[in-house]
Image: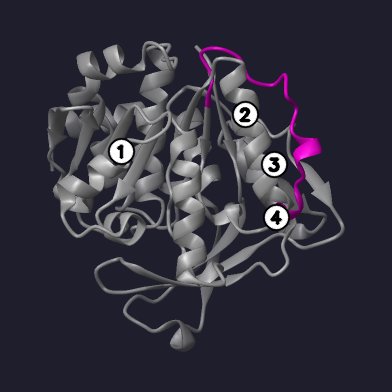
Amino acid sequence: MGTLYSIGEVLIDFIPLQKGKALKDVVSFERAPGGAPANVAASVSKLGGSSAMLTKLGEDAFGDFLLEKLAEAGVETKHIIRTSEANTALAFVSLREDGERDFSFYRKPCADLLMTADEVDESLFSAGDILHFCSVDLVESPMKHAHLKAIESAKRNGAFVSFDPNVRLPLWDSEEACRETILSFIPKAHLIKISDEELEFITGLSDEQAAIKSLFTGDVKAVIYTRGADGAALYMNDRKMESAGFSVQVQDTTGAGDAFIGSFLFQMLELETAPENSLSILEQHGEEMLQFANAAGAITTTGKGAISSLPSIRQINEMLTSPL
């Protein structure tokens, strides 16, 4: 079984102890490890897979805390670099009554954006591995070029590449810069995971099917389209598979999409997926993989925070056999 390498931000999510309040009105928070790429890596390791994080953290207490929590989750941390040039990133979150979120980010500057292309080990990846990335760390910075180096190295060594745009507009100078950057990275990936809230913004197309079709460019072999509680669909060329969502009592949606894609990629690792066999594997197992991933995402929303709420295989199988 290969390794999931996740590159990008690791940060502290400060989760409010009160729901239904605007961020300016929240008076107390609890800290939780976060950052979408880190959540995905933790999802894979918690399910029993091998995962590692590629990033840079500040030489501060928050960086110490994140290293500790990633290691506890089973994520390999030896490739994480520390720096005194910038602090570890923070995100303050407010939760509406329905569990949806508003964010305020403290990451100008932050340590993860300082990782350079020279700090990416070209020999790290091999066939059977998966490289996963998101868009938050694709802003103009040394880290953007580290992503380019990692993607190039992974593909050259036969690894599979996954991209979840995970749009966070407050972190960009403009909506257009965010959109153009995401569109430039989509052709570099083999698998794209995109949500119903992101599709029109990224593609510029209001017709759902036309928008999804437009994502099949460059090396893209498959697109996963997620619709929250309404489930998800997997598209491959002219083929479509769907899986319904699960009804649960939502506490916090933080990390649900990361749990979804993490559990999907875990299954791809189990099935020894590579770029050349990915379509046949997805055609054969896609529906059950979607169902497994939907269950993982749903379970994650029933707790607070991302990594602490990620499910085990036992929890997922219980939901699949006795859906809530």
Between 162 and 29, the residue placed more toward the observer is 162
Between marks 4 and 1, how big is the CA–CA gap?
29 Å
Between marks 2 and 4, how big is the CA–CA gap?
19 Å
The image quarter in which residue 232 lies:
top left
| Rendered image: mark on residue 211 | none
Eye-nearest disc, 3 or 4: 3
| Residue marked by disc 2 | 152
- Give the mark, 2 or 1, whose residue is nearer the N terminus: 2
| Rendered image: mark on residue 146 | 3
Q: Is residue 87 left or right of residue 222?
A: right
The residue at the point 56 percent across, 22 percent down is 155
| Residue marked by disc 1 | 296
Kind of residue sitting beneath label 1: Ala
- Give the mark, 2 or 4, whose residue is nearer the N terminus: 4
Between marks 1 and 3, how big is the CA–CA gap?
30 Å
Q: Is residue 101 magenta?
A: no
Between marks 2 and 1, how big is the CA–CA gap?
30 Å
Eye-nearest disc, 3 or 2: 2
The image quarter in which residue 260 lies:
top left
